[in-house]
Image (cartoon, rainbow, N blue to C red):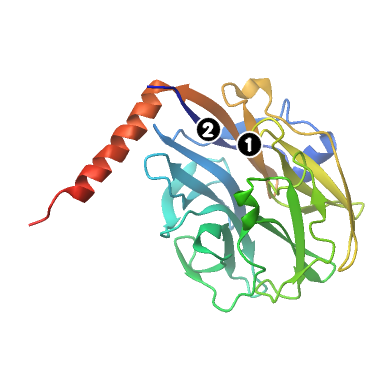
């Protein structure tokens, strides 16, 4: 039996705001609080958070290699970053990840997770925050998307994404932009799409941030050497319904102090005074591979067993 190569992601909370980290250009020496290890064959990734009252609600992809369909979990933390609750909040027949969390104009909470395997991009509204969500009907997104990252800027919504069909290549080097007057659409593809092709700085990887000087910085994934190898901040200097211009900053990698989770970094999201990240450890474990294969065979045996 060969070695199984799996990426195990670890989610952390950096004790510094995202604009401050982007200005510093490094993650070294930033204090970090890590979420607990979810156990064998599992990881927590793609963290996005929002403060409500005196609690931080951190939403993330919860993935189990034995199931291979991601769900969305919430972690509720107090001001001291103690976890006071943890529960699954969104489970679908298809894979879910990258749960961008937003507040609507009426104060309600919206979630825009990656849901491309369902054939479309979906938007959910909380009916009982943070535990119950209902899909918003009538959204007119420009097809299924990878890591769709919205930003309200200059009186309209902007959406940075990689089209889902790019996975067929497979490619992670394409950035598209769309704009709309409402988050539910209709969305208008930018005439310059794809506005960027670069395996080091195109696929979105977190929260777009408007800086004090008016520029927008979009975290993107550097996948040149490995999937989610680092975060490249992409400085967007021109963003209109006709124009787009941007240039990358030096990539942000996982510091040595995060060992063993130093093999990659693919999410950087803003949460007020905190910044949420995930970092990976690449495992090449025969035990892990055996565990996943045994679980797969057990499921197949159960499926084939006659029921009386």
Element assignment for label 2: strand
**Residue shown at the point (55%, 27%) measured from the top left:** 281
**Residue shown at the point (34%, 27%) measured from the top left:** 290
Tag on residue 298? none
Tell me if residue 181 can be seen: yes
**Residue shown at the point (76%, 38%) measured from the top left:** 200
Residue 130 location in percent, x, y? 49, 60
Q: Quadrant of the C terminus?
A: bottom left
Dividing the picture into quadrants, the one containing residue 162 is bottom right
Q: Answer yes or no: do the residues labelled 1 and 2 have beta carbons within 8 Å?
A: yes
Give 131 or 150, whichever is nearer the viewer: 150
Give 100 or 243, whichever is nearer the viewer: 243
Q: What distance separates the C-alpha of mark 1 from that of mark 2?
A: 9 Å
Give 174 or 271, whichever is nearer the viewer: 174
Q: Residue furthest bottom?
A: 138
**Residue shown at the point (85%, 51%) measured from the top left:** 211
Element assignment for label 1: loop
- Dot 1, how many residues are within 10 Å of its Cα: few (below 14), some (14-19), or many (20+)? some
Q: Which residue is mark 2?
A: 7
**On screen, 137 above or below 126?**
below
Residue 120 location in percent, x, y? 56, 66
Residue 147 location in percent, x, y? 64, 53
Q: Is residue 216 left or right of residue 199?
A: right
- Dot 2, how many residues are within 10 Å of its Cα: few (below 14), some (14-19), or many (20+)? many
Q: Quadrant of the N terminus?
A: top left
Dividing the picture into quadrants, the one containing residue 39 is top left
Tell me if residue 115 can be seen: no
Q: Which residue is mark 1?
A: 227
């Amino acid at each position: 039996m060969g070695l199984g190569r799996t990426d195990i992601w670890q989610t952390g909370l950096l004790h510094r705001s995202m604009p401050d980290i982007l200005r510093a250009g490094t993650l070294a020496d930033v204090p970090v609080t890590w979420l607990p290890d979810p156990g064998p064959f599992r990881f927590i990734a793609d963290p996005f958070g929002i403060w409500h009252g005196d609690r931080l609600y951190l939403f993330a992809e919860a993935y189990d290699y034995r199931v291979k369909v991601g769900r969305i979990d919430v972690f509720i933390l107090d001001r001291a970053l103690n976890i006071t609750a943890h529960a699954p909040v969104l489970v679908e027949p298809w894979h879910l990840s990258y749960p961008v969390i937003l507040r609507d104009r009426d104060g309600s909470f919206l979630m825009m997770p990656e849901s491309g395997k369902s054939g479309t991009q979906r938007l959910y509204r909380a009916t009982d925050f943070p535990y119950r969500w209902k899909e918003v009907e009538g959204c007119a997104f420009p097809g299924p998307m990878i890591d769709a990252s919205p930003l309200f800027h200059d009186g309209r919504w902007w959406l940075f994404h990689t089209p889902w069909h790019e996975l067929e290549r497979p490619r992670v080097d394409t950035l598209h932009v769309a704009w709309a007057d409402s988050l539910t659409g209709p969305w208008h593809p930018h005439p310059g799409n794809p506005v960027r092709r670069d395996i080091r700085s195109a696929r979105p990887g977190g929260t777009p941030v408007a800086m004090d000087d008016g520029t927008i910085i979009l975290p993107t994934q550097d996948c040149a050497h490995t999937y989610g190898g680092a975060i490249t901040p992409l400085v967007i200097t021109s963003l209109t319904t006709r124009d787009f211009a941007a240039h990358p900053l030096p990539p942000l990698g996982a510091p040595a102090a995060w060992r063993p989770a130093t093999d990659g970094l693919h999410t950087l999201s803003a949460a007020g005074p905190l910044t949420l990240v995930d970092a990976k450890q690449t495992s090449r474990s025969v035990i892990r591979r055996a565990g996943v294969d045994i679980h797969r065979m057990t499921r197949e045996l159960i499926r084939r067993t006659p029921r009386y």
